[in-house]
Image (cartoon, coloured by chain):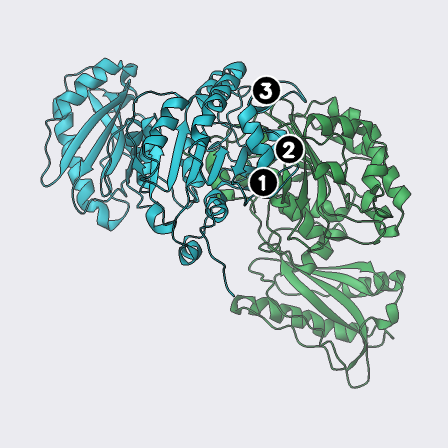
Chain colours: A green, B cyan
């Protein structure tokens, strides 16, 4: 991962602008042997010009062969080794629904479930109740209060919800209450000594919730999993000396950006043009912009090869608006691959383009695509090195040693 | 970094010759998008032939994005992780002026400075006194003696000098005496307990120096920084089983070579021909030769694209003299990049050529240049792996495990 201590010693005052444009799940594979990938099929004249002028490479999101989720994949792009910095599922779930998680909060994923007369779980998903029912039940649970802490109960989807506690001295090192078999839910148990008061609060909340839910069939009980606190990640301002901003439509990516200390820019619209306009509006206020495009991944997960290529084309078409701002360093990449033939995230290294007028190495890559990126001057490299390379090409790092 | 323990177990008796030819700051970038780099512009028929026959790659000197100084960059080429093995600035400065530093010596960088009537530093560089004045003041300080140790005071340039103590039990873990603000110089303070006797000696020296300098205006006081001992690096003879020699014109590189236990060959002249002749003269006495060419870096720092290309051409022209010796392994690389468009060291990976008749992998690289190296069989790799690869291609390492 990025060596934060080393970088901190080498940082120079900031007079340059860095843009990290992430097309979610950008990487792909061909539909037939030797055919083009989605990116290679897409007509991308602007990206191809940047590729010819800049340096290309392929990034490994986590480790070779490892398929990342969206949280770890973005942490890696931000320079944090996602194996070292694991964000608890409760935290990710809360971020994913747009909950404004604060440092110190403890968050858990909740399931409504069905218990029999003896209290044993007989359906871990309460017959997959509809989301409307989930919202209704969450509203019934919201009035529960606990001494000294604020409590939030937020519906997610179907039988899933989030529980968040806010207060001082809370600690998320608490075991799941789901016994994973036909048995009563477990009490919340502290894994570390310092989590015992939090576990006691959660057990008090569970007790009150049990009373409220007891006549609700099939969702007459609940379990909590992935209890976790904000992982306390080093902040972008500290490790890179950057005033950084996130431009993203989906809550999850805004949330992960907040975890590393980025400001989240509010804007209207969802298109690449709208996102680039938001960057333009705040161009003078920040040194670093993370722009997230979601639908490359969505079309990949749908198995829609042509649709994914079209999303890439729409980003390319809007790109002149971004280039007009004259960023000093522009990186275009994905957080991971989502090949439409696999209809899912994958481990394949991700095509990466680094364009920085006057400071980039020449290479043989002449267009933005997986095959050309394999010929690039950046080689195959860890996604966690994207940020150090961005800083270097922005001439933001002084020499190490004499 | 090179796994010294692993290598030691695998070393075979030496019957082969390895040559590491380092053109300082070899790597470059194009003057205009898609133009050639300095190395690519240079006419290098001999290097191109070796490139076609051998394997190519790109080395990362320290970490991706990190621009190294000359000391760390050479340590990396020699197999030592320069983040783990940091050589103190006092040691590097002493080596840079050609001082014959010995194991156990403690060296510091000194500044002459100006203090006011209250002893507060009002000019950290004593008005940048000329070097002639610096030499005169160092001569006045040389008579200072300390109990049980030898003392050396050596001028560097302008207001800068080196102080070196030689004796038993000395320890360089001592803080800078420069307060970095308008205040009196600090006393030398031990960072570690075992450095306290050394700190006391240095304070005694400073006290005597203060008396000698008090009427010298503007250089009426001094500060000491970067106090350090020889880092005690593992020796080439131990970790690689090599009888190794350095052929270099500049003191700094001869000094770093001595730190890893190389013999330094004395020779006359400064050209590549002169250096290759020195190698020839000692060909039978050593198994490993490190040859250092400085002016590639100097022309790069001058911003002289054509000049740097010409230096590379002069090395290429002299190369047949080296090849006549029939080395078993010849590596041609740089310690870092010094693109003339940046007029400074840079982080860009360094073109690397490994030629070893009969043991090298074929690759698509057909000429010695950054673009071709990006296609090479060696890929993008850490500079600290150059030595293990050299040993392997010299058939010096046995199988690991059965």
Residue B111: percent from left, percent from top: 27, 25
Marks 1/2: CA distance?
10 Å
> Is A26 drawn above or below residue A400 in the view shown?
below
**Residue A292 is at least partly visible in this image:** no
**As rendered, which of A247 and B258 lies closer to the eye?**
B258
Q: Which mark is residue B41?
A: 3
Q: Are marks 1 and 2 in contact (CB under 8 Å)?
A: yes
Image height of B200 relative to A137, above or below: above
Rounded to the nearest angstrom, the CA distance separating label 1 from label 3 is: 40 Å
* Residue B284 falls left or right of residue B104: right
**In the image, is residue A323 above or below residue B176?**
above
Q: Residue at left 88%, top 67%?
A: A129
Residue A116, picture quadrant:
bottom right
User: To which residue does mark 2 refer?
Assistant: A288
Question: What chain is tagged by disc 3?
Answer: B
Asked whether the residues under marks 2 and 3 belong to the same chain, the reply is no
Whole-percent x and y of residue B38?
56, 21
Q: Residue furthest bottom?
A: A118
> Which mark is drawn over residue B139?
none
Question: Disc 1 designates what residue?
Answer: A236
Disc 1 on helix, strand or loop? helix
Q: Which class describes the residues within 10 Å of circle 3: few (<14), some (14-19), or many (20+)?
A: some
Residue A310: percent from left, percent from top: 88, 38
Q: Is residue B10 left or right of residue A77?
A: left
The residue positioned 68% from the left and 28% from the top of the image is: A54
The answer to whether B205 appears left or right of B178 in the picture is: left
């Amino acid at each position: 991962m990025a060596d934060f201590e080393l970088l901190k010693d080498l940082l120079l005052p900031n007079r340059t602008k860095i843009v990290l444009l992430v097309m979610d799940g950008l990487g792909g594979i061909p539909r037939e042997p030797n055919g083009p990938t989605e990116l290679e099929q897409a007509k991308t004249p602007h990206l191809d010009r940047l590729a010819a002028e800049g340096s290309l490479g392929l990034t490994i999101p986590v480790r070779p062969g490892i398929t990342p989720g969206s949280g770890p994949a973005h942490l890696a792009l931000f320079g944090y080794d996602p194996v070292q910095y694991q964000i608890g599922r409760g935290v990710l779930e809360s971020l994913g629904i747009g909950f404004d998680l604060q440092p110190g909060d403890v968050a858990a994923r909740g399931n409504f479930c069905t218990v029999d007369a003896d209290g044993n779980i007989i359906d871990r998903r309460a017959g997959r109740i509809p989301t409307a029912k989930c919202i209704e039940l969450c509203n019934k649970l919201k009035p529960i209060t606990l001494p000294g802490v604020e409590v939030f109960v937020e519906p997610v989807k179907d039988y899933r919800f989030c529980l968040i506690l806010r207060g001082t001295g809370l600690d998320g090192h608490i075991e799941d209450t789901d016994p994973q078999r036909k048995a009563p839910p477990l009490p919340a148990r502290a894994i570390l000594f310092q989590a015992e008061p939090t576990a006691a609060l959660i057990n008090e909340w569970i007790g009150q919730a049990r009373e409220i839910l007891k006549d609700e069939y099939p969702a007459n009980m609940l379990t909590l999993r992935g209890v976790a606190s904000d992982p306390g990640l080093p902040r972008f301002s500290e490790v890179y000396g950057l005033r950084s901003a996130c431009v993203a439509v989906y809550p999850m990516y805004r949330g992960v950006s907040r975890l590393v200390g980025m400001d989240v820019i509010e804007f209207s619209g969802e298109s690449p043009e709208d996102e680039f306009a938001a960057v333009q509006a705040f161009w003078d206020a920040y040194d670093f912009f993370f722009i997230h495009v979601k639908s490359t991944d969505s079309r990949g997960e749908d198995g829609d090869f042509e649709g994914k290529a079209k999303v890439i084309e729409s980003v390319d078409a809007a790109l002149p608006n971004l280039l007009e701002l004259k960023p000093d360093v522009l990186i275009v990449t994905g957080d991971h691959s989502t090949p439409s033939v696999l209809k899912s995230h994958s481990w394949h290294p991700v095509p990466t383009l680094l364009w920085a007028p006057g400071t980039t190495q020449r290479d043989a890559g002449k267009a933005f695509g997986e095959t050309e990126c394999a010929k690039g001057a950046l080689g195959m490299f860890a996604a966690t090195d994207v940020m150090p390379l961005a800083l270097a090409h922005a001439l933001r790092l002084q020499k190490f040693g004499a």
